């Protein structure tokens, strides 16, 4: 398995710099890039990442891109964390919630990697301060993030400080005085001076590798498909698959045949099921939790979320009150005024142009129809789109979601997949 050209450039960029940042969208391969650089250096690294990424992504990706390097996952109970630290692995991975504990249990590392660097945007935070006290001996410091300016230029300071205090200085006050104007002293509100963003980016440019959207585009910007894996308690799922019935108090969810069972399994994979009385029984929040993380990692960039069931739409609207549906929202979306647009594949037909309002689309659940799937993506990935299109598919592990992915790839019929789901 080889890196893409831009990934090789980025890996070389890290290898040549002790203090550096990689700015690239979720799914661009930042982990693979970093592992390639780690493998070339053969030093002891600490990786700090969101818990889901620390547990699932780094150990898995290391086997693909740096199989010679040992990985210890430092999460869980204090005893489990101490045991991981004592392994003295080539790569030790922990999560941000453990930073204060780690500051009191730190062992020597040659390098540290901050995956999703924006988690350290607040230099006044307890985690930041705890880390700052023990980070001096670590010479190599790399930060990975999607875009650390999306929430405002002010957030850049903390992220740069933890990487290298030479980038923007040691004092946030001095940084604000240089690049901002105080507009409300009582509430501490600052506004960037004209040209500040460009000036700051120019200042940190030597330490920053930026993967620009569409940088490697041909006629159309590239389409990147990223599967976001989520896990849930499988008890109800297995019961439905085997017995074709579930009971929730007085409510029952019943499947009369293989096709209905498949639909019920897809519902359960999204965290709910329709009962016999037509009411909705919510069973798990795992996909919504994963969606929350994804939106946060992408800095809440304008995003289309695709649903297939009414219950999904209702829960999305409950959790995200400002989300809009496609009806009467097309113009606002294309003008960049809609952060979250909820659409059903059947409403995303031919001729619907959504390419001007954003470049990210999330399939909360997938349609069985290859045509609907491709049409929906085509609302963004079409002529006039100026950025790489990122398509995220929420996949619940070991469920029918994985069958649908294969069906879309293999163009299998619904009926054959429905039967296969029950094997």
Image (tube, helix red, strand yellow):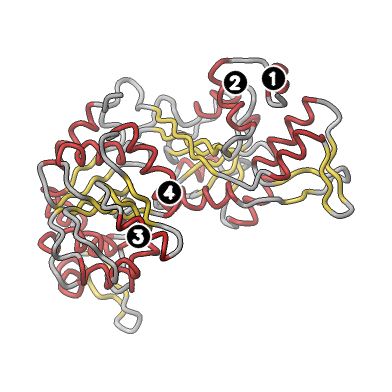
- Quarter-of-image position of residue 322: bottom right
Residue 108, above or below 311: below
- Quarter-of-image position of residue 219: top left
Give the CA distance from mark 4 to mark 1. Answer: 34 Å
Give the CA distance from mark 2 to mark 1. Answer: 8 Å
- As drawn, the label of residue 414 is 1
Residue that numbered label 3 is attached to: 119
- As drawn, the label of residue 407 is 2
**Quadrant that contains the N terminus:** top left
Of badges 4 and 1, nearer the viewer stands 4
The spot of residue 339 in percent (x, y) is 48, 50
User: First in sequence: mark 2 or mark 3?
Assistant: 3
- As drawn, the label of residue 353 is none
User: First in sequence: mark 4 or mark 3?
Assistant: 4
For the residue pair 123 and 75, the one nearer the viewer reads as: 75
Q: Residue furthest bottom?
A: 186
- As drawn, the label of residue 55 is 4
The spot of residue 116 in percent (x, y) is 34, 52
Asked if the residues shown at circle 4 and circle 3 are in contact, with their CB atoms under 8 angstroms apart, the answer is: no
Give the CA distance from mark 4 to mark 3. Answer: 17 Å
- Residue 194 visible (yes or no): no
Give the CA distance from mark 2 to mark 3. Answer: 37 Å
């Amino acid at each position: 398995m080889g890196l893409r050209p831009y990934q090789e450039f980025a890996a070389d960029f890290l290898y040549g710099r002790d203090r550096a940042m990689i700015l690239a969208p979720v799914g661009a391969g930042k982990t693979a890039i970093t592992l390639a650089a780690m493998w070339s250096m053969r030093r002891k690294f600490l990786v700090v990442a969101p818990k889901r990424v620390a547990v699932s992504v780094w150990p898995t990706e290391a086997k693909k891109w740096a199989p010679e390097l040992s990985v210890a996952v430092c999460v869980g109970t204090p005893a489990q964390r101490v045991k991981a630290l004592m392994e003295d692995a080539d790569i030790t991975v922990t999560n941000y919630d453990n930073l204060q504990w780690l500051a009191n249990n730190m062992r020597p590392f040659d390098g540290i990697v901050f995956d999703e660097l924006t988690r350290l945007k607040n230099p006044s935070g307890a985690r930041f301060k705890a880390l700052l006290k023990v980070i001096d001996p670590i010479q190599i410091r790399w930060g990975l993030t999607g875009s650390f300016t999306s929430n405002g230029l002010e957030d850049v300071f903390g992220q740069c400080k933890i990487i290298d205090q030479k980038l923007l200085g040691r004092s946030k006050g001095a940084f604000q005085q240089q690049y901002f104007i105080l507009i409300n002293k009582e509430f501490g509100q600052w506004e960037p001076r004209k040209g500040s963003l460009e000036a700051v980016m120019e200042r940190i440019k030597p330490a920053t590798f930026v993967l620009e959207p569409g940088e490697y585009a041909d006629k159309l910007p590239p389409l990147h498909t990223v599967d976001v894996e989520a896990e849930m308690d499988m008890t109800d799922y297995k019961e439905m698959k085997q017995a074709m019935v579930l009971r929730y108090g007085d409510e029952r969810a019943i499947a009369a045949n293989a096709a209905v069972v498949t639909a019920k399994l897809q519902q359960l994979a999204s965290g709910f099921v329709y009962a016999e009385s037509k009411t909705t029984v919510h069973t798990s929040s795992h996909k919504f939790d994963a969606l929350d993380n994804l939106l946060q990692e992408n800095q809440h960039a304008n995003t289309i979320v695709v649903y297939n069931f009414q219950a999904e739409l209702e829960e999305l609207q409950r959790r995200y009150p400002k989300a809009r549906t496609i009806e009467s929202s097309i113009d606002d979306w294309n003008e960049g005024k809609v952060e979250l647009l909820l659409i059903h594949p059947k409403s995303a037909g031919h001729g619907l142009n959504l390419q001007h309002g954003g470049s990210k689309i999330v399939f909360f659940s997938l349609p069985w129809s290859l045509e609907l799937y491709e049409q929906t993506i085509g609302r963004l990935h079409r002529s006039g789109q100026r950025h790489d299109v990122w398509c995220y598919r929420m996949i619940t592990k070991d469920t029918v979601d994985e069958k649908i992915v294969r069906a879309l790839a293999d163009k299998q019929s619904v009926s054959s997949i429905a039967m296969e789901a029950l094997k």
